[in-house]
Amino acid sequence: MRRPSQEGLREIWRLALPIIASMASATVAGFVDTWFVALVGTAEVAAAMPAGITAYTLTAFPLGITQCVSTFAAQSLGRGKPQEGAAYTWQGLYLSLVVGAGCFLLWPTAPSFFASFGHEPEVVTLEVTYFRLRLWGVGLSVAIGALNGFFYGIHRPRVPLVAMVIDNIANVILCYILVFGKLGAPVLGLAGAALAFVLSFVAQLAVLLGAFLSHPC
């Protein structure tokens, strides 16, 4: 069996390390957010997990589709036609608009859905608030997946890394400000954590979209 060359291993690490670093950054930010919410109260922690998982579930299938952009972008790069990779990325962005708008059909069903789990009324109210705010981030998440796939496919993983780090820094700062009402902001508690989550997605998408639109292909 032929062993990988030193040059090949270096190339693998060059592509993999930014992905590893971005995932580690997201883990740290998620821990800090959970810690902030836990300082507010146990009901907030109890509500954040089911509502957050439900919101994430809405992104799972479309996000899986848009992450296929990396495969098509890599193939396009290999054929010497990187502009085709950009075309696939645009399809992912169009899909994010459809998903982002369509998920709001669930807005009126949220109270009955979370009440069906038999949680206490206080927790249900928090779940509904958190879930509805997180709906604003569903389409953003899918768009981010498409853009990340493009940059991974053309061997520029540092762009998603920078965007993810900015996202996580913004998330932690905004979460602290909005959850506890710092710097003149109102005390929003769990709603503040959800709002910080969505706004940090906006920051991440802005970085990725700016880099994508400025790409020569």
Image (cartoon, rainbow, N blue to C red):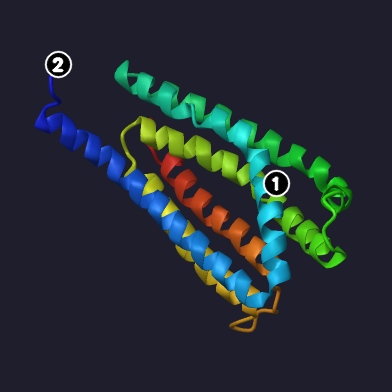
Amino acid type at circle 2 is Met
Q: Which residue is mark 1?
A: 54
Amino acid type at circle 1 is Thr
Q: Residue at x 64, y 74 (%)?
A: 179
Q: Residue at x 72, y 61 (%)?
A: 47
Please state, as top left, top right, bottom left or bottom right, where the C terminus lies in the image.
Answer: top left
- Per the model, the C-alpha gap separating discs 2 and 1 is 46 Å
Callout 1: SS: helix
Residue 77 against residue 34 in the figure, above or below: above
User: Could you say which disc has been placed on residue 1 in the image?
Assistant: 2
- Give whichever of discs 2 and 1 has the lower sequence position: 2
Left or right for 113, reference 170: right
How would you rate the neighbour count of disc 2 (Cα within 10 Å): few for under 14, some for 14-19, many for 20 or more? few
The answer, for residue 210, to whether it is visible in the render is yes
The spot of residue 166 in percent (x, y) is 44, 59
* Total numbered labels placed on residues in the image: 2
Left or right for 189, reference 176: right
